[in-house]
Image (spheres, helix red, strand yellow):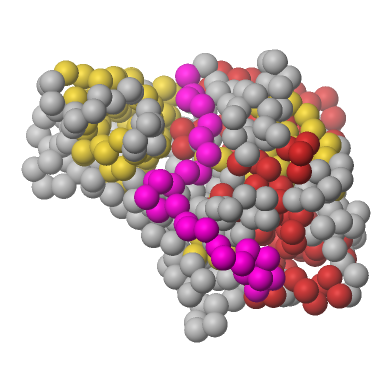
Amino acid sequence: MMDRVLIRPPRRQRRVRSLLLLLLVACLSLYIPRTFAASIPKTTVDTVDANPSALRAHLLADMGVPAWHTKGWRGQGVKVAVLDSGFRGYKTHLGEALPEHVTAHSFRIDGNLEAKDSQHGILCGEVVHAIAPEAELLFVNWETEQPEQFIEAVRWARRQGARIITCSLIMPTWSDGEGGGAVHKALAEALGKGDKPEDVLFFACAGNTAQRHWGGSFHDGGDGRHEWAPGRTDNLIRPWEGEKPSVELCWRPGAVYELSVQDLTTEREAGRCEAKIGDGHCCAAVKFDPEAGHTYAARVRLVGGTPGSFHLTVLGGGLEETTVHGSVPFPADGREVMAVGAEDREGRRQEYSSCGPNGPSLKPDFAAVVPFPSLWRTRPFSGTSAAAPQAAGLAALLRSAHSDWPAERSRDALLGAAHRPDAPNLTGEVGRGDLHLP
C-alpha cells in the first residue's frame, strides 16, 4: 500500500481558501445577533470581600503562581490579547490594576475602544496582570454583530505578536453548539495548528448558561412543535430585571426550525425568527422587550427537513425546562479553544457554570475558582468571565519560561497539570480539573 503524502497547497490557493472562509463568515453576519458578556443574574452576584489582597494571594498560591514568580518567570516576553467589549476608563488603571502601557485597537466602525459603558474587559486584564505582571496586554474590541470582525481582531492580535488570547464573551448562534460552523473554521485557521511557537492559545469562558439552556433531540408534540417535557410545548422564560432577553437557537444542518416567543398573558406573539442556514450550522434568534407582569414562553417548530438535536439558550433571562450538559456556547465549544469553567472555593462547580460535553469534545477543559478579587472596586469579579483570564495568565508564565515550545505543547502541559484533590473528574462539569501550573 502506498504511503499517503500530504502536500501543502500553494500560497495563492491557501489565500483563496482563507478569503472563502471570511466570505462565509461575512454572510453569516447578515443575520447573527450580537455578542453578550457571560453575565449571571444579579441575585447571584458575590458579596464584597473583606480582604481582597489576602484572598488573591491565596488563590494564586493554590495555582502554584508564587513559585514561578520566585524563579523569575513573571510573563516577560509574552503578549496576551483581551478580546472584549468593555474597556471604558481603562487608562485610569494603567500602572496599577493594569500594566503601565496597553496596546489598544478597535475594529468598531467608529474606532472607539471605550464605546460601551462597561469595565468587563478591564477586569479580565486585571486578572491576567495579577498572575503574569510582566506580560504585555493588548485590548481589542469589534462590532459585536460582525463575526468577520471578530476573526480580524484575532488575526490582528497574532500579527501584533500575541501568543495568548482570552475572551469572556459568548455568542451562542455563531456555531452549531457543538464546535462546528464557518466561524469556528476561520478561528482555527487564524490561531494556527499549534505545532509552532508563534501559534496562539485561545482561552474562553465556558459560559454562565447552565441554568438557561436546553439541548437535545427534537420531539414532536403532535402539532409540529417541540415537546420540552411530556405535554409541554411552551418553555417559560423569566426575563431578568432591566434586561431585554435574547432567545437563541442553533443546530447542525438537516432540519429547518422556526423559533418564536409567545406572550402568554396577551396570547400574542412577541417575536418570531425562521431558520438561517449557514455553512456547517443553522441558527435563529428572537430578542424582545418584556412587559412587567407578563409571562413568556419559547416555542420551536419543525418546518422542514429531518429533525435532529438543537441547543436553545436564553440570554438576559431564565428558562424553566433546562438541560445542564451541552450548555457551553461559542467560542468555548470549539476544539481549537480551551474552555474554562467556574468553581467555588470548596471545589464545587458554580451552579451557573456551563457544562459539556459539546459534541466530540470534552468541555470545559479546566475549572478556576471564582470570584477573583479586584483591587480597584469593592465587588469581586464573578462568573466564568473571571475564570478564562486566570488560565491565560498561567499560560503566559508557562510560555515565558518556554518560549520555544509550540503552542500545543504548552496546552498539553496545562492540561496535564490540572488536578483535583480527590479524583479525576471527566463528567463535563470541571473538565480535567483545577487550573494549576506544572
In which quadrant of the rendered view does residue 54 lie? bottom right
Quadrant of the rendering where the C terminus is positioned: bottom right
Identified at 53% across, 39% down, the residue is: 37
Q: Is residue 184 above or below residue 285?
A: below
Return the residue nearer the eye: 317 or 213.
Answer: 317
Q: Is residue 35 above or below residue 73?
A: above
Identified at 80% across, 63% down, the residue is: 397
- Inspect this view and state whether residue 158 appears: no
In this picture, residue 215 sits left or right of residue 161: left
In which quadrant of the rendered view does residue 374 lie? bottom right
Q: Is residue 249 a member of the stretch shown in magenta?
A: no
- Inspect this view and state whether residue 91 appears: yes
Q: Position of residue 125 (x, y in %)?
A: 71, 47
In this picture, residue 103 sits left or right of residue 311: right
In this picture, residue 308 sits left or right of residue 132: left
In the displayed image of the protein, which residue is found farthest to the bottom?
422
Q: Position of residue 159 (x, y in %)?
A: 85, 36
Q: Is residue 286 above or below residue 221?
A: above
Number of marks in picture: 0
Quadrant of the rendering where the N terminus is positioned: bottom right
Q: The magenta stretch spans which residues?
A: 31-58
Q: Position of residue 239 (x, y in %)?
A: 30, 35
Q: Is residue 44 a member of the stretch shown in magenta?
A: yes
Identified at 44% across, 62% down, the residue is: 350
